[in-house]
Image: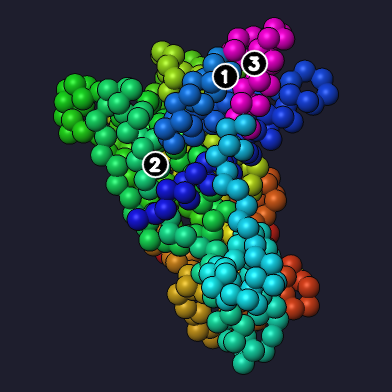
């Protein structure tokens, strides 16, 4: 069983981040950023409701409602945000335990029973140590590499929690939304034993609550509607945790009605680019659905209709180097996937060079290195790579350079819009290496060897 105090810590960390965003928006030069204010109060409302803090949830809802409408808004709306933010700060301070008392040196000497059984170390310090160990490990020869690996594993275990630590809070969030909306929903999880860094879990906690509420509000139909459509009366939502390179991936998939594309057309307007492609199967709809203020809901409630939920999720993910994607199949359901940077991950990979640039592929994705046929150009070795969906692709490179174990950092937002790369690292000589996502092709003039 997960310690309930841990959920309070997660709530406090998330709430403080939203309060910081509120403060920046309220004190910035020029008109306050209404989008940032609305997103922050929407997040604080959902987080408070999930924790059962009904009074805080009501206050956040009132502050959010005061910011609705077209600018310019009255000064009282922003004054209410400031007062409510102070109330949240006071509530957080009141809920934090007093710092533990530390015995003096004299007391330790006179009575060993006064020695503390444990000490508190900031997670940030452990994280920095773990990163330094991982980078040092990649630079040292094999004997020291193995010893540092054991030490690194020990530090890493202190920083990791099972993804299942999020499960109780997610169940509460969905149960509350389903009750309000009159839905019957079965929630299942896959990969909850996967261990992720605390920072990664804290980043995912609130966005996942948003996605579950959205699935109940926009995806899962009412029991009577599901019966008429030949579906089980109880809707189904599945949350799956996995790791892909340097990113933690979490998908939320429902068997509901899917995104109403006609209503989305109407909400976006006739002059929005890309509308003609909306009927394309498996198109990522996130760029359309995450526009500020857009909503496909036909009615306004505490759960839906404000056009804030997905926008808030996307902003939160992008702020920390993550991303959101969404695909739908009308009548059959919707799948939303979050990608968040792993707090720490050493990736064993195969290093290659092409056109003077160093690339790496995850070692587990390398199926084989084909034997050259007689007469094949000497500068065209090919790697056979298997992607997560089972697709095998041949990749042409100039030179294979052996194995590299490295800590890959996420790429800056906007650097790789096509999702071709999983991260970037440095070799011992300081050269940058791009980690290729299996199933994608390297940029440049050379065509891929073949696809099977």
Task: Tell me the SS state at disc 1.
Answer: helix
In percent of width and height, residue 207 lies at 50, 39
> Which image quadrant for residue 381?
bottom right
Residue 407: quarter of image: bottom right
Question: Residue shown at 37%/45% (left/top)?
Answer: 168
Percent of width and height locating residue 154: 54, 75
Q: Which residues are magenta?
A: 66-89
Residue 137 shows in this picture:
yes
Query: In the visual, does 20 lie left or right of 316?
Result: right
Report the front residue among 96 and 331: 96
Q: Residue drawn 58% across and 37% down?
A: 94
Instruction: Tell which circle, 2 or 1, labels the residue nearer the N-terminal end.
Output: 1
* Residue 234 location (% of width, % of height): 21, 33
Q: Which residue is mark 3?
A: 80
Badge 2 is on which residue?
A: 170
Label 3 element class: helix
What separation in Å lies between label 2 and label 1 (alpha carbons)? Answer: 23 Å
Q: Which of the two marks, 3 or 1, is nearer to us in this view?
A: 3
| Neighbours of disc 2 within 10 Å: few (<14), some (14-19), many (20+) | many
Q: Which mark is residue 439?
A: none
Using the image, determine if residue 300 lies above or below residue 214: above
Task: Name the foreground residue: 435 vs 451.
Answer: 435
**Which residue lies under the disc numbered 1?**
64
């Amino acid at each position: 069983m997960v310690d309930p105090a841990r959920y309070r810590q997660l709530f406090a960390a998330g709430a403080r981040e939203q309060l910081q965003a509120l403060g920046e928006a309220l004190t910035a030069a020029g008109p306050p950023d209404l989008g940032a204010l609305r997103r922050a109060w929407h997040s604080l409302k959902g987080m408070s409701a999930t924790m059962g803090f009904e009074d805080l949830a009501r206050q956040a809802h009132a502050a959010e409602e005061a910011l609705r409408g077209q600018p310019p808004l009255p000064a009282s709306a922003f004054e209410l945000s400031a007062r409510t933010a102070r109330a949240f700060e006071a509530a957080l301070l009141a809920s934090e335990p007093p710092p533990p008392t530390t015995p003096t040196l004299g007391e330790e000497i006179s009575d060993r029973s006064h020695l503390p059984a444990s000490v508190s170390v900031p997670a940030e310090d452990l994280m920095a140590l773990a990163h330094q160990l991982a980078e040092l490990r990649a630079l040292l020869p094999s004997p020291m590499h193995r010893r540092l690996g054991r030490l690194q594993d020990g530090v890493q275990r202190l920083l990791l929690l099972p993804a299942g630590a999020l499960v109780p809070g997610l169940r509460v969030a969905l149960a509350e939304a389903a009750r309000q909306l009159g839905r019957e929903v079965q929630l299942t999880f896959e990969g909850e034993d996967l261990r992720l860094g605390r920072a990664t879990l804290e980043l995912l906690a609130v966005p996942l609550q948003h996605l579950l509420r959205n699935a109940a509000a926009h995806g899962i139909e009412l029991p009577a509607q599901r019966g008429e459509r030949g579906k089980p009366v109880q809707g189904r939502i599945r949350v799956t945790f996995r790791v892909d390179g340097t990113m933690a991936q979490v998908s939320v998939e429902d068997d509901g009605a899917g995104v109403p594309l006609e209503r989305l057309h109407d909400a976006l307007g006739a002059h929005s680019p890309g509308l003609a492609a909306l009927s394309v199967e498996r198109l990522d709809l996130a760029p359309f659905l995450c526009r500020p203020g857009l909503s496909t809901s036909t009615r306004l409630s505490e759960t839906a209709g404000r056009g804030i939920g997905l926008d808030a999720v996307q902003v939160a993910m992008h702020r920390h180097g993550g991303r959101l994607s969404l695909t739908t199949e009308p009548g059959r359901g919707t799948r939303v996937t979050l990608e968040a940077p792993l707090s720490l991950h050493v990736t064993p990979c195969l290093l290659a060079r092409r056109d003077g640039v160093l690339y790496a592929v995850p070692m587990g994705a390398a199926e084989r290195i084909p034997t050259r046929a007689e007469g094949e150009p000497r500068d065209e070795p090919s790697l056979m790579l298997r992607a997560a969906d089972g697709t095998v692709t041949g990749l042409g490179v100039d030179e294979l350079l052996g194995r590299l174990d490295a800590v890959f950092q996420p790429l800056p937002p906007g650097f790789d819009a096509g999702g071709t790369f999983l991260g970037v690292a440095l070799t011992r000589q300081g050269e940058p290496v791009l980690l290729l996502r299996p199933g994608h092709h390297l940029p440049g003039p050379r065509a891929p060897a073949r696809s099977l």
